Image: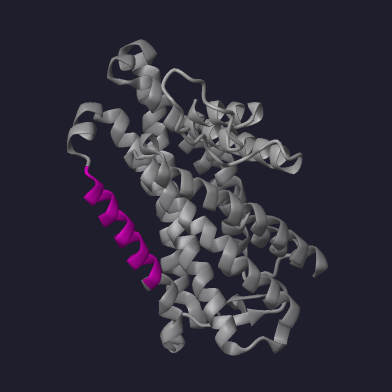
Amino acid sequence: MVTINQTNSTIANPGSIGNSINIYFIYKIPSLHSYNNMLIAHLAVADFLQATLTLPMAIANSLLRHAIPPAMCQAFAFILNFLLAIALAATAAISIDRCLAVIYPYQYQAKMKTNYIIMIVIFIWILAAVLAGTPLLGLQRYGLGEYTFIADGLQCWFDFQYRQRSSIIFIILYIYLLLTILTTLVSYLIIFCIAYNKGIADISAVGYASLRRSIRTTALIVGSNFACFIPTLISVSISYFSQRELNPGLTVAAYLLSFCNSAINPLIYAFTNGILRQKIKQHCCCSKKRYCLTKFGLYRTSKITPSNTAAGQPAAKSDSEPSYWQTVINDYESS
Protein backbone atom coordinates (compact mmCIF):
# COMPACT_ATOMS: atom_id res chain seq x y z
CA MET A 1 0.00 0.00 0.00
CA VAL A 2 2.91 2.31 0.76
CA THR A 3 4.32 1.66 -2.71
CA ILE A 4 0.96 2.48 -4.31
CA ASN A 5 0.70 5.78 -2.45
CA GLN A 6 4.30 6.67 -3.27
CA THR A 7 3.66 5.93 -6.95
CA ASN A 8 0.54 8.09 -6.95
CA SER A 9 2.45 10.93 -5.29
CA THR A 10 5.31 10.58 -7.79
CA ILE A 11 2.86 10.85 -10.69
CA ALA A 12 0.86 13.70 -9.14
CA ASN A 13 3.79 16.09 -8.65
CA PRO A 14 5.13 16.29 -12.24
CA GLY A 15 1.59 15.94 -13.58
CA SER A 16 0.27 18.99 -11.76
CA ILE A 17 3.38 21.14 -12.22
CA GLY A 18 4.16 20.16 -15.82
CA ASN A 19 0.62 20.55 -17.13
CA SER A 20 0.10 23.88 -15.38
CA ILE A 21 3.34 25.21 -16.92
CA ASN A 22 2.32 24.06 -20.41
CA ILE A 23 -1.16 25.55 -20.08
CA TYR A 24 0.30 28.85 -18.89
CA PHE A 25 2.79 29.20 -21.74
CA ILE A 26 0.30 28.09 -24.41
CA TYR A 27 -2.02 30.83 -23.15
CA LYS A 28 0.68 33.52 -22.89
CA ILE A 29 2.65 32.91 -26.11
CA PRO A 30 0.74 34.06 -29.24
CA SER A 31 2.81 31.86 -31.57
CA LEU A 32 1.43 28.78 -29.77
CA HIS A 33 -2.20 29.77 -30.39
CA SER A 34 -2.79 27.15 -33.08
CA TYR A 35 -5.78 24.84 -33.33
CA ASN A 36 -3.64 21.81 -32.60
CA ASN A 37 -2.16 23.44 -29.50
CA MET A 38 -5.66 24.32 -28.32
CA LEU A 39 -6.53 20.62 -28.38
CA ILE A 40 -3.26 19.77 -26.64
CA ALA A 41 -4.04 22.38 -23.98
CA HIS A 42 -7.45 20.74 -23.57
CA LEU A 43 -5.75 17.41 -22.94
CA ALA A 44 -3.35 19.14 -20.53
CA VAL A 45 -6.33 20.46 -18.53
CA ALA A 46 -7.70 16.92 -18.19
CA ASP A 47 -4.27 15.62 -17.15
CA PHE A 48 -3.88 18.48 -14.65
CA LEU A 49 -7.23 17.65 -13.06
CA GLN A 50 -6.25 13.99 -13.01
CA ALA A 51 -3.08 14.81 -11.09
CA THR A 52 -4.67 17.29 -8.68
CA LEU A 53 -8.03 15.59 -8.01
CA THR A 54 -7.99 11.89 -8.83
CA LEU A 55 -4.57 10.93 -7.49
CA PRO A 56 -4.96 12.56 -4.04
CA MET A 57 -8.35 10.86 -3.72
CA ALA A 58 -6.76 7.57 -4.79
CA ILE A 59 -4.21 7.91 -1.99
CA ALA A 60 -7.02 8.58 0.50
CA ASN A 61 -8.95 5.54 -0.76
CA SER A 62 -6.01 3.20 -0.29
CA LEU A 63 -5.47 4.53 3.24
CA LEU A 64 -9.12 4.36 4.32
CA ARG A 65 -9.87 1.09 2.51
CA HIS A 66 -13.25 -0.26 3.68
CA ALA A 67 -13.75 2.74 5.96
CA ILE A 68 -14.07 5.06 2.98
CA PRO A 69 -17.36 7.04 3.02
CA PRO A 70 -19.77 5.98 0.24
CA ALA A 71 -20.04 9.55 -1.07
CA MET A 72 -16.26 9.80 -1.41
CA CYS A 73 -16.13 6.44 -3.17
CA GLN A 74 -18.81 7.55 -5.64
CA ALA A 75 -17.11 10.90 -6.23
CA PHE A 76 -13.74 9.29 -6.91
CA ALA A 77 -15.15 6.76 -9.39
CA PHE A 78 -17.09 9.49 -11.21
CA ILE A 79 -14.07 11.82 -11.50
CA LEU A 80 -11.85 8.92 -12.58
CA ASN A 81 -14.18 7.78 -15.38
CA PHE A 82 -14.99 11.38 -16.35
CA LEU A 83 -11.36 12.45 -16.81
CA LEU A 84 -10.29 9.20 -18.47
CA ALA A 85 -13.14 9.55 -20.97
CA ILE A 86 -12.06 13.14 -21.68
CA ALA A 87 -8.42 12.10 -22.14
CA LEU A 88 -9.33 9.34 -24.59
CA ALA A 89 -11.65 11.56 -26.63
CA ALA A 90 -9.12 14.42 -26.59
CA THR A 91 -6.45 12.05 -27.91
CA ALA A 92 -8.75 10.99 -30.74
CA ALA A 93 -9.62 14.63 -31.51
CA ILE A 94 -5.93 15.56 -31.72
CA SER A 95 -5.32 12.68 -34.13
CA ILE A 96 -8.28 13.62 -36.34
CA ASP A 97 -7.13 17.25 -36.38
CA ARG A 98 -3.65 16.29 -37.62
CA CYS A 99 -5.15 13.89 -40.16
CA LEU A 100 -7.36 16.62 -41.64
CA ALA A 101 -4.41 19.02 -41.71
CA VAL A 102 -2.46 16.51 -43.82
CA ILE A 103 -5.29 15.42 -46.14
CA TYR A 104 -6.76 18.90 -46.74
CA PRO A 105 -3.99 21.39 -45.90
CA TYR A 106 -5.47 24.39 -47.74
CA GLN A 107 -9.06 23.78 -46.69
CA TYR A 108 -7.95 23.18 -43.11
CA GLN A 109 -6.27 26.56 -42.84
CA ALA A 110 -9.15 28.35 -44.56
CA LYS A 111 -12.15 26.73 -42.88
CA MET A 112 -10.94 25.72 -39.42
CA LYS A 113 -12.30 28.04 -36.72
CA THR A 114 -11.81 28.47 -33.00
CA ASN A 115 -15.55 27.97 -32.52
CA TYR A 116 -15.22 24.45 -33.93
CA ILE A 117 -12.59 23.60 -31.32
CA ILE A 118 -14.79 25.00 -28.55
CA MET A 119 -17.75 22.94 -29.78
CA ILE A 120 -15.61 19.79 -29.85
CA VAL A 121 -14.39 20.41 -26.30
CA ILE A 122 -17.93 21.02 -25.00
CA PHE A 123 -19.21 17.87 -26.72
CA ILE A 124 -16.39 15.78 -25.23
CA TRP A 125 -17.08 17.04 -21.71
CA ILE A 126 -20.83 16.47 -21.98
CA LEU A 127 -20.34 12.95 -23.36
CA ALA A 128 -17.81 12.11 -20.63
CA ALA A 129 -20.16 13.45 -17.94
CA VAL A 130 -23.02 11.27 -19.23
CA LEU A 131 -20.86 8.14 -19.35
CA ALA A 132 -19.35 8.69 -15.91
CA GLY A 133 -22.56 9.90 -14.28
CA THR A 134 -24.88 7.09 -15.39
CA PRO A 135 -23.75 4.66 -12.62
CA LEU A 136 -24.69 7.31 -10.03
CA LEU A 137 -28.39 7.15 -10.96
CA GLY A 138 -29.07 3.95 -8.99
CA LEU A 139 -30.15 1.98 -12.06
CA GLN A 140 -27.88 -1.03 -11.45
CA ARG A 141 -30.85 -3.42 -11.73
CA TYR A 142 -31.00 -2.42 -15.40
CA GLY A 143 -27.29 -3.05 -15.87
CA LEU A 144 -26.34 0.64 -15.85
CA GLY A 145 -23.67 0.24 -13.21
CA GLU A 146 -22.82 0.83 -9.59
CA TYR A 147 -19.57 2.16 -8.14
CA THR A 148 -18.30 0.07 -5.22
CA PHE A 149 -15.03 -0.38 -3.34
CA ILE A 150 -12.79 -3.11 -4.78
CA ALA A 151 -10.46 -4.57 -2.17
CA ASP A 152 -7.95 -6.05 -4.64
CA GLY A 153 -7.40 -2.75 -6.40
CA LEU A 154 -7.85 -0.63 -3.26
CA GLN A 155 -10.10 1.70 -5.27
CA CYS A 156 -13.73 2.32 -6.24
CA TRP A 157 -15.05 1.19 -9.61
CA PHE A 158 -17.25 -1.56 -11.08
CA ASP A 159 -17.14 -4.84 -9.18
CA PHE A 160 -17.18 -7.59 -11.81
CA GLN A 161 -18.23 -10.19 -9.24
CA TYR A 162 -21.71 -8.74 -9.82
CA ARG A 163 -21.62 -8.52 -13.60
CA GLN A 164 -25.34 -8.04 -14.11
CA ARG A 165 -25.29 -4.73 -12.26
CA SER A 166 -22.81 -3.19 -14.72
CA SER A 167 -23.30 -5.26 -17.87
CA ILE A 168 -24.75 -2.54 -20.14
CA ILE A 169 -22.68 0.42 -18.96
CA PHE A 170 -19.50 -1.64 -19.15
CA ILE A 171 -20.22 -2.63 -22.76
CA ILE A 172 -20.91 1.04 -23.58
CA LEU A 173 -17.63 2.15 -21.98
CA TYR A 174 -15.78 -0.71 -23.66
CA ILE A 175 -17.09 0.28 -27.10
CA TYR A 176 -16.23 3.93 -26.36
CA LEU A 177 -12.68 2.93 -25.48
CA LEU A 178 -12.27 0.79 -28.60
CA LEU A 179 -13.70 3.50 -30.88
CA THR A 180 -11.34 6.17 -29.57
CA ILE A 181 -8.35 3.86 -29.93
CA LEU A 182 -9.32 2.73 -33.43
CA THR A 183 -10.02 6.31 -34.51
CA THR A 184 -6.58 7.37 -33.35
CA LEU A 185 -4.85 4.43 -35.01
CA VAL A 186 -6.66 4.93 -38.33
CA SER A 187 -5.90 8.67 -38.30
CA TYR A 188 -2.17 8.15 -37.88
CA LEU A 189 -2.15 5.30 -40.37
CA ILE A 190 -3.63 7.70 -42.94
CA ILE A 191 -1.07 10.37 -42.00
CA PHE A 192 1.89 8.04 -42.44
CA CYS A 193 0.53 6.62 -45.71
CA ILE A 194 0.09 10.10 -47.20
CA ALA A 195 3.51 11.20 -46.01
CA TYR A 196 5.08 8.08 -47.52
CA ASN A 197 3.27 8.33 -50.87
CA LYS A 198 3.69 12.06 -51.46
CA GLY A 199 7.13 12.47 -49.98
CA ILE A 200 8.49 15.42 -48.08
CA ALA A 201 9.29 17.40 -51.22
CA ASP A 202 5.67 17.40 -52.39
CA ILE A 203 4.20 18.45 -49.06
CA SER A 204 6.81 21.08 -48.18
CA ALA A 205 5.00 23.61 -50.36
CA VAL A 206 2.14 23.79 -47.85
CA GLY A 207 4.29 24.26 -44.78
CA TYR A 208 5.08 20.65 -44.06
CA ALA A 209 7.98 21.52 -41.77
CA SER A 210 5.79 22.90 -38.98
CA LEU A 211 3.13 20.28 -39.69
CA ARG A 212 5.71 17.52 -39.38
CA ARG A 213 6.83 18.84 -35.99
CA SER A 214 3.26 18.96 -34.71
CA ILE A 215 2.63 15.43 -35.99
CA ARG A 216 5.76 14.21 -34.21
CA THR A 217 4.64 15.80 -30.94
CA THR A 218 1.09 14.49 -31.13
CA ALA A 219 2.28 11.03 -32.20
CA LEU A 220 4.47 10.79 -29.10
CA ILE A 221 1.63 11.96 -26.86
CA VAL A 222 -0.81 9.51 -28.45
CA GLY A 223 1.75 6.71 -28.20
CA SER A 224 2.28 7.36 -24.50
CA ASN A 225 -1.48 7.36 -23.92
CA PHE A 226 -1.79 4.01 -25.66
CA ALA A 227 1.06 2.57 -23.60
CA CYS A 228 -0.76 3.68 -20.45
CA PHE A 229 -4.33 2.70 -21.38
CA ILE A 230 -3.95 -0.58 -23.28
CA PRO A 231 -2.72 -2.64 -20.25
CA THR A 232 -5.78 -1.45 -18.35
CA LEU A 233 -8.01 -2.40 -21.29
CA ILE A 234 -6.49 -5.88 -21.41
CA SER A 235 -6.79 -6.49 -17.67
CA VAL A 236 -10.39 -5.26 -17.56
CA SER A 237 -11.31 -7.38 -20.60
CA ILE A 238 -9.86 -10.53 -19.03
CA SER A 239 -11.60 -9.88 -15.71
CA TYR A 240 -14.99 -9.21 -17.29
CA PHE A 241 -15.24 -11.63 -20.20
CA SER A 242 -13.40 -14.62 -18.72
CA GLN A 243 -14.79 -14.11 -15.20
CA ARG A 244 -11.34 -14.85 -13.78
CA GLU A 245 -9.62 -12.75 -11.18
CA LEU A 246 -6.19 -11.53 -12.22
CA ASN A 247 -3.23 -11.39 -9.89
CA PRO A 248 -3.81 -8.39 -7.58
CA GLY A 249 -0.31 -7.13 -8.35
CA LEU A 250 -1.02 -7.04 -12.09
CA THR A 251 -4.36 -5.34 -11.49
CA VAL A 252 -2.76 -2.62 -9.38
CA ALA A 253 0.10 -2.18 -11.89
CA ALA A 254 -2.32 -1.71 -14.80
CA TYR A 255 -4.40 0.66 -12.69
CA LEU A 256 -1.38 2.81 -11.76
CA LEU A 257 -0.14 2.81 -15.35
CA SER A 258 -3.38 4.45 -16.50
CA PHE A 259 -2.40 7.56 -14.50
CA CYS A 260 1.13 7.86 -15.87
CA ASN A 261 0.08 9.69 -19.02
CA SER A 262 -0.82 12.76 -16.93
CA ALA A 263 2.87 13.06 -15.98
CA ILE A 264 4.37 11.94 -19.31
CA ASN A 265 2.36 14.15 -21.69
CA PRO A 266 3.60 17.54 -20.39
CA LEU A 267 7.21 16.35 -20.56
CA ILE A 268 6.78 15.20 -24.17
CA TYR A 269 5.19 18.49 -25.22
CA ALA A 270 7.79 20.61 -23.41
CA PHE A 271 10.74 18.76 -24.95
CA THR A 272 9.39 18.48 -28.50
CA ASN A 273 8.02 22.02 -28.93
CA GLY A 274 10.94 24.34 -29.68
CA ILE A 275 9.14 27.58 -28.78
CA LEU A 276 7.92 26.26 -25.45
CA ARG A 277 11.30 24.74 -24.64
CA GLN A 278 13.06 28.04 -25.34
CA LYS A 279 10.61 30.05 -23.23
CA ILE A 280 10.89 27.68 -20.28
CA LYS A 281 14.68 27.74 -20.48
CA GLN A 282 14.72 31.53 -20.71
CA HIS A 283 12.34 31.88 -17.79
CA CYS A 284 14.35 29.47 -15.60
CA CYS A 285 17.70 31.10 -16.45
CA CYS A 286 16.35 34.60 -15.81
CA SER A 287 14.87 33.58 -12.45
CA LYS A 288 18.12 31.88 -11.46
CA LYS A 289 20.21 34.96 -12.32
CA ARG A 290 17.83 37.22 -10.44
CA TYR A 291 18.11 35.00 -7.36
CA CYS A 292 21.91 34.82 -7.46
CA LEU A 293 22.42 38.56 -7.97
CA THR A 294 19.87 39.46 -5.30
CA LYS A 295 21.49 37.07 -2.84
CA PHE A 296 24.90 38.71 -3.26
CA GLY A 297 23.50 42.26 -3.26
CA LEU A 298 24.35 42.93 -6.90
CA TYR A 299 20.78 43.33 -8.19
CA ARG A 300 18.80 46.53 -7.63
CA THR A 301 15.38 47.24 -9.06
CA SER A 302 15.69 51.05 -9.04
CA LYS A 303 16.01 52.94 -12.30
CA ILE A 304 18.01 55.98 -13.41
CA THR A 305 16.35 59.28 -12.58
CA PRO A 306 17.18 62.38 -14.61
CA SER A 307 19.24 65.04 -12.81
CA ASN A 308 18.39 68.74 -12.94
CA THR A 309 21.82 70.03 -13.87
CA ALA A 310 22.88 73.14 -15.60
CA ALA A 311 23.34 73.03 -19.34
CA GLY A 312 26.74 71.81 -20.40
CA GLN A 313 27.63 70.39 -16.98
CA PRO A 314 27.87 66.64 -16.39
CA ALA A 315 25.26 65.10 -14.16
CA ALA A 316 26.35 63.90 -10.77
CA LYS A 317 26.27 60.14 -10.25
CA SER A 318 22.99 59.25 -8.59
CA ASP A 319 22.54 56.55 -5.96
CA SER A 320 19.77 55.14 -8.09
CA GLU A 321 22.05 54.52 -11.05
CA PRO A 322 22.06 50.79 -11.86
CA SER A 323 25.13 48.72 -11.29
CA TYR A 324 26.97 46.81 -13.97
CA TRP A 325 25.10 43.61 -13.10
CA GLN A 326 21.76 45.43 -13.22
CA THR A 327 22.62 46.53 -16.77
CA VAL A 328 23.49 42.94 -17.69
CA ILE A 329 20.14 41.72 -16.40
CA ASN A 330 18.23 44.46 -18.23
CA ASP A 331 20.01 43.64 -21.49
CA TYR A 332 19.26 39.94 -20.98
CA GLU A 333 15.58 40.52 -20.32
CA SER A 334 15.16 42.83 -23.30
CA SER A 335 16.81 40.36 -25.69
Name, please, the residue furthest toward the top.
Answer: 201
**Percent coordinates x, y for residue 320 in the rendering:** 58, 38
Q: Nearer the viewer, residue 70 or 325?
A: 325
Say which residue appears at 70% left-offset and 71% top-offset. Answer: 59
Q: Is residue 147 left or right of residue 184?
A: right
Say which residue appears at 47% left-offset and 49% top-offset. Answer: 23
Magenta residues, start to end: 113-129
Occupied quadrant, residue 9: bottom right
Image vertical order of residue 244 relative to residue 295, above or below: below
Say which residue appears at 49% left-offset and 36% top-offset. Answer: 305
**Percent coordinates x, y for residue 119 in the rendering:** 26, 56
Q: Nearer the viewer, residue 52 or 325?
A: 325
Say which residue appears at 54% left-offset and 75% top-offset. Answer: 77
Residue 105 is one of the magenta-drawn residues: no
Main SS class of the magenta portion in the image? helix
Q: Nearer the viewer, residue 305 or 58?
A: 305
Image vertical order of residue 227 relative to residue 137, above or below: above
Tell how many labels: 0
